[in-house]
Amino acid sequence: MRSITRTPPRVILLFLLPGLVGFVVFLAFPLVMAFAISFTNYSGGPRFRFVGLSNYLRAFSNPDFMNSLGVTARFTLWTVAGQLLLASPSPSSSTRDSAAAASFAACSSCPMSFPRSPWASPSCFSSIPSEGR
């Protein structure tokens, strides 16, 4: 019988390193930089000046921005509610062995991928059974 050995922390870190580098390079760093730039008057080029909260004050005092914020909030609430309602029956229906159940399961998961990423949408349509065609 083979014994279980403890994996050295260095090996664990080597496996985690690509994900951590990707997280920092593609998510954390751009997020921090975007937040920092939002406090300046940067509009391209090498020059910018710190303006504090004036960008935020101007945005939140603009009625068009506030309208857009409300529309976005309503869209998010309706989309999340719709996804939850459509996705909740799919696990029980996908246990049956029929093309209709498989189609329902595939179609009910499609709305969940549309807001997330444009490259996830084609996989929804390719997962719908073609019934031998």
Image: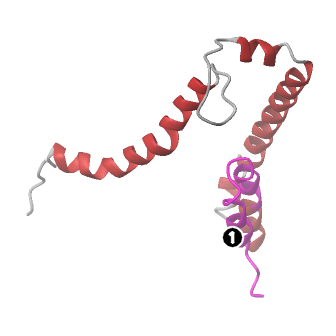
The residue under label 1 is which amino acid type? Answer: Ser
* Residue 116 x, y percent position in the rendering: 68, 48
* Residue 66 x, y percent position in the rendering: 86, 20
Q: Is residue 1 magenta?
A: no
* Residue 82 x, y percent position in the rendering: 80, 42
Q: Quadrant of the C terminus?
A: bottom right
Closer to us: 58 or 3 = 58
* Residue 24 x, y percent position in the rendering: 43, 40
In the image, is 54 to the left or to the right of 20?
A: right
In the image, is 105 to the left or to the right of 68?
A: left
Q: Is residue 127 magenta?
A: yes
Closer to us: 33 or 133 = 33
Residue topped by disc 1: 127
Closer to us: 2 or 59 = 59
Q: Is residue 120 above or below residue 28?
A: below
Q: Is residue 23 above or below residue 106?
A: above
The residue depicted at 85 percent of the width and 30 percent of the height is 74
The residue depicted at 66 percent of the width and 36 percent of the height is 44
In the image, is 47 to the left or to the right of 73?
A: left
* Crowd tier of the residue under label 1, counting other residues whose Cα lies within 10 Å: few below 14, some 14–19, many 20 or above: some
Q: Is residue 62 above or below residue 113?
A: above
Q: Quadrant of the N terminus?
A: bottom left
User: Secondary structure beneath disc 1?
Assistant: loop
The range drawn in magenta is 107-133
Q: How is the image coloured?
A: secondary structure
